[in-house]
Amino acid sequence: MCGITGWIDWERDLLQAGPVLEEMTQTLAPRGPDASGSWLSTHAALGHRRLIVVDPAGGGQPMVRRQGEHTYVLVYNGELYNTAELRAELADLGYAFQGRSDTEVLLTAYMAWGRACVNRFNGIFAFAVWDEFEQSLFLARDRMGVKPLFYTQQGSALLFASELKAILAHPLVKPEIDVTGLAEVMVMGPARTPGHGVFRGIREVRPGYYLTFTKENLRLERYWHLESRLHQDDLDATVSKVRKLFLDTVSRQLVSDVPVCTFLSGGLDSSAITAVAAQSYSEAGLGPLRTFSIDYKDNDRHFQASEFQPNSDAPWAKLMSEACGTEHNTVIIDTPQLVEALGDAVIARDLPGMADVDSSLLLFCREIKQQATVALSGECADEIFGGYPWFRSEEALNSGTFPWSRQLEERTGVFSPDVLEAIRPREYLDQRYRETLDEVPECPDDLPREKSMRQMFYLNLIWFMTTLLDRKDRMSMADGLEVRVPFCDHRLVEYVWNIPWSMKFCDQREKGLLRRALKGILPDTVLARRKSPYPKTHNPAYTAAVSTRLREILHDPASPLRPLINHKALLAMTDAGGKVFDRPWFGQLMTGPQLFAYLIQLDIWLREYKVSIK
């Protein structure tokens, strides 16, 4: 994986823009620690940081190719999993290749098919192609939004980058937020409205979209969306198709010239990926597959089962590692590390995020990077197959809001009156919810119950899944670790989207359909294990540490967080150890201690990025 950035400007001579471009590009060095490159012309400046995964010699960027009068320049972040098929098709059309990288295949595909090339890609990507002859820029993002891509238009200039920090490094852009941006971090966070960049004037290219920019105009167009139709296959055929698609996507995503590993929690999703990967490694004679799991110091003493986290991972990861013959590693995170890394996680994400759920992943990836460069992870199976508790909750289905963000009043009780009046949290949340429901692709054959379930799946795919993908990309790429997510293969997502809930919930089990598809691949005990999310610390020392840190912030006259917060209410919460939240205020893991940590991250963000609220 890599980091990309660029500057297109019709009123400046960008041949002189090297120092600014270098500053923008350098902010992305953690994403691409292996190499750096730039390309300048009168109206275009493109920068790239590279993490070498395939073809070290032939995949350098920016990549330049010429065809007739046209000079094409590419900067690209991602992986194509159908590179071999595309290369063969392009060779049949008469195109020749200088190396074997997917970068060259992607650029050649654009030269051959123009913007329609994105419809042929199976992969995760964010890329830009500058056509020097046409004086036009093409930006595109993958269908699921695995790879990030932001942009802003400032007068005659367009700036883009993999991460917000690269855009903020440009002198034209100020770290400002307006009332809408404030609502994003105070109400929607750690989620983010699709397409919203939080900072004033910065937007995100949404998943499945591309952007074209010329001197005449900027156009944003959607090239992919889910299509709703009646599912025709019976249960047996559906199980067979899901199994076939899953096996194919894992196989494709094992391709690499550098060490590959898997995240292994012992849950259904990571275990399935690990089992297939380990078998592939064994058949190829590559030795044992490396696997990694995360745990927390003293969690064995303090773990408390709940509806959202029924059991701990450690014995299950051990069982799967032994069954698959992997070389297993457990990374143990201690409380002081977890608290200290809250700031690093903010810098990685450029925004306050999922608190210690972020910082723990950042530390986890940092340890994995010492042994591997590419990892496969089980994200997104729950959004696609319906694994979360709220898919089976009538209360959640009928709540009229985002099912992972239902304790709004408790959360906003710590906001200052001025903030509440400015952002109107309930109105803002409801507006974003209604906007999303208006997008749901309807199927005329759906009965009311199925229509309701389709809406629930769409909310999860568009909001919750992209929040987790955002987290996974930033925390892993901050340490130069490429993480691939096989369950995000668009072919699998498209097929499962139209499978009725009765099949997805077959055997009256969450992800019952997936469990059936994995029979014979996983041990029966793992197939039967209840859903358990990414682990968090249960150590009371963590609650004490974030409570102390938050009280320090509240008593600091220089804290930019203080004007946004109801001091009395928040101090009362810290005295109670955050126990106001008996259920998560976001997702499955974020209760009182995570609210404290989120507010600490908000304070760090406001200070470090020198954010002004306009």
Image (tube, helix red, strand yellow):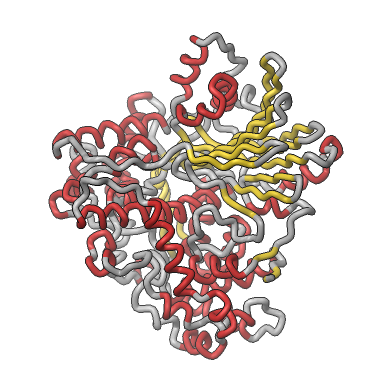
Q: Is residue 181 left or right of residue 325?
A: right
Q: Is residue 177 above or below residue 593?
A: above
The residue sitting at 61% across, 44% down in the picture is 31
The residue sitting at 41% across, 45% down in the picture is 377
Q: Residue 252: x percent and y percent?
A: 40, 29
The residue sitting at 52% across, 61% down in the picture is 359
Residue 522 in view here: yes
Q: Is residue 370 left or right of residue 497?
A: right
Residue 265 in view here: no
Q: Quadrant of the N terminus?
A: top right
Q: Nearer the viewer, residue 328 or 452?
A: 452
Q: Nearer the viewer, residue 317 or 15?
A: 15
Q: Nearer the viewer, residue 421 or 587?
A: 421
Q: Is residue 499 left or right of residue 485?
A: left
The residue sitting at 71% across, 22% down in the picture is 71
Q: Residue 592: x percent and y percent?
A: 43, 76
Q: Where, by quadrant of the figure, is residue 609 drawn?
A: bottom right
Q: Nearer the viewer, residue 101 or 527?
A: 101
Q: Quadrant of the C terminus?
A: bottom right
Q: Is residue 580 left or right of residue 528?
A: right
Q: Residue 444: x percent and y percent?
A: 24, 46
- How many tags in the picture? 0
Q: Is residue 189 above or below residue 284?
A: below
Q: Residue 91: x percent and y percent?
A: 51, 11
